[in-house]
Image: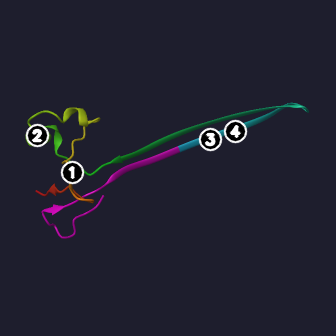
Amino acid sequence: METNPTEKKLLPVNGSNRYGLSIAADSVYTISPKMVLNLRGNFHQLTDEYAADTALIGKDGIANLFPTNFWPSLYTFDQYYYPAFDMVQGSTRTRCAFTPRR
């Protein structure tokens, strides 16, 4: 999680929740001089998601920003963050994703 060393009111913040787990097993059994049994198995789990507590706005906060109700289909889980806006001028794109500080 990033911190705000200057305590300015507008500072883009980022954070992430990452976790990885991999398990593998391999077992070889010789049945006869001409036959071998080889069993393999594996499991992989990966979490890679955005997480910044200071950028949480909540469902009510999003509803206050966008009262037209177009946004519910954009969220796939119950963490509502301040939105980011992309400003495009020609071939230049600038992302504005500032989190208001309390």
**Mark number displayed over residue 24:** 3
Residue 96 visible (yes or no): no
Range of residues picked out in magenta: 1-21
Q: Is residue 20 magenta?
A: yes
Q: Which residue is mark 1?
A: 84
List x then y, in percent, for residue 35: 86, 30
| Sequence order check, earlier mark of 1 and 3 | 3
* Image quadrant occupied by the N terminus: bottom left
**Amino acid at circle 4:** Asp
Point 16% across, 38% down: residue: 59
Q: Which residue is mark 4?
A: 26
Point 23% across, 32% down: residue: 73
**Amino acid at circle 1:** Ala
List x then y, in percent, for residue 60: 12, 38
Q: Is residue 41 magenta?
A: no
Q: SS at mark 2?
A: loop
How many marks overall? 4
